[in-house]
Image (cartoon, rainbow, N blue to C red):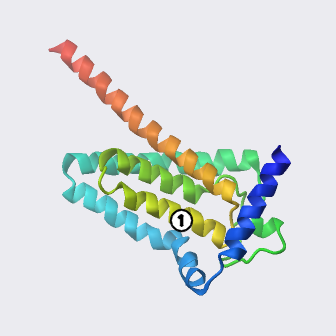
Amino acid sequence: MLSFLLWVDQLLFTAINQGASNVVFDAVMPIVTKLQWWLPVFVLGIGWLVVRGGKTGRQCALLVLAAVAVADPITNRLIKPLVARERPCRQLPQVILRIPCADGPSFPSSHAVNMAAVATVVSAFYRRGRWLWWFAALLVGFSRIYVGVHFPFDVISGWIGGIVFGMLTVKAIQKSAALLQKRRLRWW
């Protein structure tokens, strides 16, 4: 069963990395996949939430930062070394590599984990704009496969992990707030 799943993963990888090749994706995906492009978006987004979002915006910004602060190190320092899956750019000779091959293990994609965690937290606070954050998470995940540094299952697992981290962050704060509120009521 595992060998079948790995075969499907490689088949999907080849379909995206080679089969989806076109000049637009060749120009756009290496940009979309870079942290340097997303960092200003996140800084502006967090800044907007803090300054213009009121109490809800500040809570959302804090939880976004908390979710990524927990998800990223657990993904990179714990899960990736334990699984130790080789990246496609180091494993497959036919990869079209559109950015330098990243160091370290491949599974799960930390880009996908972080983007899905952000999308999950933002979606818990802002229902109307959530599609934009999920589109960004899907786009970044697709880009990681397209540029040749992750297998599809790395990205899918990253999205699942990011959703879990995001949900756990929101639930932990909700439980803490409920507990604090309950204790306040007893004291009065």
Looking at the image, can residue 87 be seen? no
Quarter occupied by residue 176: top left
Q: Is residue 81 left or right of residue 62?
A: right
* Residue 30, percent from left and from top: 58, 77
* Residue 98, percent from left and from top: 67, 79
Q: Given the image, on which type of amino acid does mark 1 rest?
A: Val
Residue 63 to residue 26: above or below: above
* Front residue (pair 173, 188): 173
| Residue at mark 1 | 140
Label 1 crowd bin: few (<14), some (14–19), many (20+), radius 10 Å:
many
Looking at the image, can residue 74 be seen? yes
Of helix, strand and loop, which one carries label 1?
helix
Name the residue furthest left.
Answer: 188
Which residue occupies 55% across, 70% down? 33
Which residue occupies 21% across, 46% down? 55
Quarter occupied by residue 104: bottom right
The N terminus - image quarter? top right
Name the residue furthest bottom.
Answer: 23
The C terminus - image quarter? top left
Q: Is residue 60 left or right of residue 71?
A: left
* Residue 105, percent from left and from top: 73, 57
